[in-house]
Amino acid sequence: MNTAKATLPASLLTARWWWAAASVSSLAFAAGFFLNAASRPAQEAPGFWGAGVALVGLGLIIGYCTFRLWLGQLAGRTSLTWCGIIVGIPLLTRGVRVGIFGALLLVGVLLLWSPGTIKYFAPQAKAARAKRRATRIAEKLHNQR
C-alpha cells in the first residue's frame, strides 16, 4: 500500500483558504446583523436576528467542512460543493450585494473541482466506490440466502 502523501495542488491550497475566508466572512456578516438588530426598533429587529442566526449556521457549517477539507478528506470537498451550490445559486438572484457573496461561494466550488484537486482526491474516490460496491455485493449475497 502506498502511504506517501500526494503533493498538495495549488488549487486545493487556494480552496482551503478561500473557504476559510468564506466562513469568517459569514460569521462577520452575522455579527453585523446582530449589532444592527440591537439598534433597530422592536418591529424590525426579528428579521435581523433571524438573518444573523442563519449566517452563524452557515459560517459554522462552512467552517466544519473546511476543517475536513484541510484534513484532506473527500467528504469536506463534497460537503462544501453542496453548500456552495445550494447557497450560492439562490444568492445570485437576490441582487448585487448578496449576489457577490453567492458568486464568491461558486468560485470556491470551481476551485474544489479544478483538475489538480480532482487528481488529488481521485484515490479516495476510487476507494469509496470500491467500498460501496463491496457492500452492495455482500448485501445482495446475503439477500439471496
Image: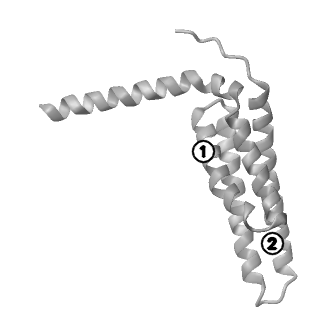
Q: Is residue 3 above or below residue 20?
A: above
Viewer-side residue, 36 vs 9: 9
The kind of residue on which mark 2 rests is Phe
**Is label 1 in a helix, a strand or a loop?**
helix
Q: CA distance from mark 2 to mark 1?
A: 27 Å
In the rendered image of this protein, does residue 57 appear above or below residue 34?
Answer: above
Q: Residue reaching furthest right?
A: 39
Q: Upstream in the sequence, badge 2 or badge 1? A: 2
Q: Kindly identify the residue that appears in the image at 70 percent across and 74 percent down.
A: 50
Q: What residue sits 39% from the left and 31% below the top?
A: 132
* Horizontal side, residue 12 vs residue 75: left or right: right
- Which one is in front in this view, the residue at disc 2 or the one at disc 1? 1
Residue 91, numbered circle: none
Q: Is residue 25 left or right of residue 46?
A: right
- The single residue placed furthest to the top in the displayed view is 1
2 and 1 marks in contact (CB < 8 Å) = no
Characterize the local packing of mark 1: few (<14), some (14-19) or many (20 or more) Cα atoms within 10 angstroms. Answer: some
Residue 117 point in image, percent of width and height: 68, 28
Q: Say what amino acid the circle numbered 1 marks.
A: Ser
Residue that badge 1 annotates: 79
Residue wearing tag 2: 34
Count of picture labels: 2
Q: Position of residue 104 (x, y in %)?
A: 79, 50
